[in-house]
Image: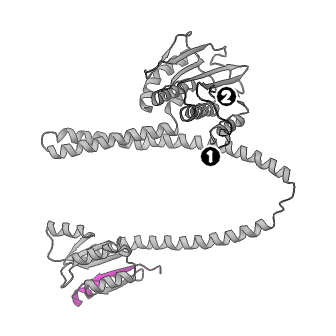
Amino acid sequence: MFTPRVLLVNDDPANLLALKSLLPGRDDYEVITARSGEEALRWVLTYDFAVILLDVNMPGMDGFETAEAIHSHPRSASVPIILVTAHYADEMHRLKGYQRGAVDYLFTPIIPQILQTKVAVFVDLAKKNLQLKRQTLELERLNVTLQEQRKQDLQHINERKQAEEALRQSQEELRQLASYQERIKEDERKRIAREIHDELGQNLLALRIDIAMLHARTGTTHPKLNRKVHAVLDHIDATMKAMRAIINNLRPTVLDLGLNAAIEWQVKEFQRRTGIACALLMPDKELAIDDNRATAVFRILQESLNNVFRHARATKATIELQTRDERLLMTVSDNGVGIFPGCRRKANSFGLVGIKERVSALGGEFTLNTAQDKGTSIAISIPLGGDAGATVDGSEAPLQERRATDGVNQIVVAPAGRADTARRRKDKELPAKLNEST
């Protein structure tokens, strides 16, 4: 069952014997011979083969017809076929062979080393496939054994022992696990986004430069090739755009510039995508907050704005961010239809639950105010913790309004005091980051 097989097909017994003699060391695989295309088809329907060496010039069903018949059957559709011939060496016949499913050609007289190397490649591939099948069977047997063991273990559990205490501990552990998973997920998103940007992004850029050079050089000499290269450039540009979108979905690069810049960018993007007018009230100076809290606040804002877009039917949203008594306060409100009674208990509706769990994991407070046809307001309060004050210099931060006007895809920032040096430096970096993100 786990031994690879090689099929040799040739109508001449002498050629068949010679071909078989060129395959030494057959302890690793089994060689089967066939004298005609019909006999080869019968073998293919009986066994799986690592590779088939098929003579082209045979009476009756020739090699082209045999290859086509072999690949027309589902059982043997993926079997690699190497055509062996002494006559059909021109390009038309080679193209015909490839169209019938051949993967390679061998021309007689055959060089033994070439034949042995080609066969060894396909035999090794078949061995790996067979090994994978064996491991799959072993894993299935092991899974059955583990399931039986699990059933026996569950039977010995004392379900009544300290039930209330176990439930309380379980809930606490689940909350801690959810918080840990969120941190791990954010770290993984950041890592994947950076790897995509550093590895795939650079490779795509290098590829685009090479293709662009080819496009420039073939403009007048090879018009047809130039058009094809232009289409390839379009595909590369689309791929790079999709890559940037994936990176932003994983972790927006603007988040590295600070919470203020990230929130400003998110509100702007939300308004651009949805057309909902947004008013943003936020401290002029940069908030000094650690990365975990900044990421949590950003994700809470994303989920809140998504709820506004999907459920609120609102025309305006207001986002307010401020610090008070060593706590970060954020409020997201809209003028929509509000939350109807019972909607918060819908199946698969975890938006508000996720926000509540994020806030709870940070030791904060979550408040929801809503009424039918009177809009919804979500307020969170998170401790800044440690010596992280309200602003970079520790002073009370005045609010400034960044209001997005209807029909304009940018946020107009009203002057509200002089920003510090760190904020001005990040403001200079922001356009480049925004351009990269979008």
> Which residue corresponds to the image point at 43% horizontal and 32% vertical from the top-left?
438
Percent across and percent down for residue 226 are 19, 43
Q: How many neighbours does mark 1 have within 10 angstroms: few (below 14), some (14-19), or many (20 or more)?
A: few
Magenta segment includes 133:
no
Amino acid on which the number 2 mark rests in the picture: Ala
Magenta segment includes 10:
yes
- Give the left or right position of residue 24, taking residue 149 as reference: left
Percent across and percent down for residue 340 are 65, 35
Percent across and percent down for residue 88 are 15, 73
Q: Which mark is residue 371?
A: 2
SS for tag 2?
Answer: loop
Q: Taking 191 as reference, is 1 above or below it?
A: below
Q: Which mark is residue 77?
A: none
The foreground one among 160 and 295 is 160
For residue 25, say whether it is visible. no
For residue 418, say whether it is visible. yes
Q: Quadrant of residue 123?
A: bottom left
Q: Quadrant of residue 140?
A: bottom right
Q: Quadrant of residue 114?
A: bottom left
- Tell me the residue that label 1 is attached to: 348
Q: Which residues are magenta?
A: 1-29
Amino acid on which the number 1 mark rests in the picture: Asn
- Give the left or right position of residue 306, taking residue 48 as reference: right
> Which residue corresponds to the image point at 77% horizontal and 45% vertical from the top-left?
172
SS for tag 1?
Answer: loop
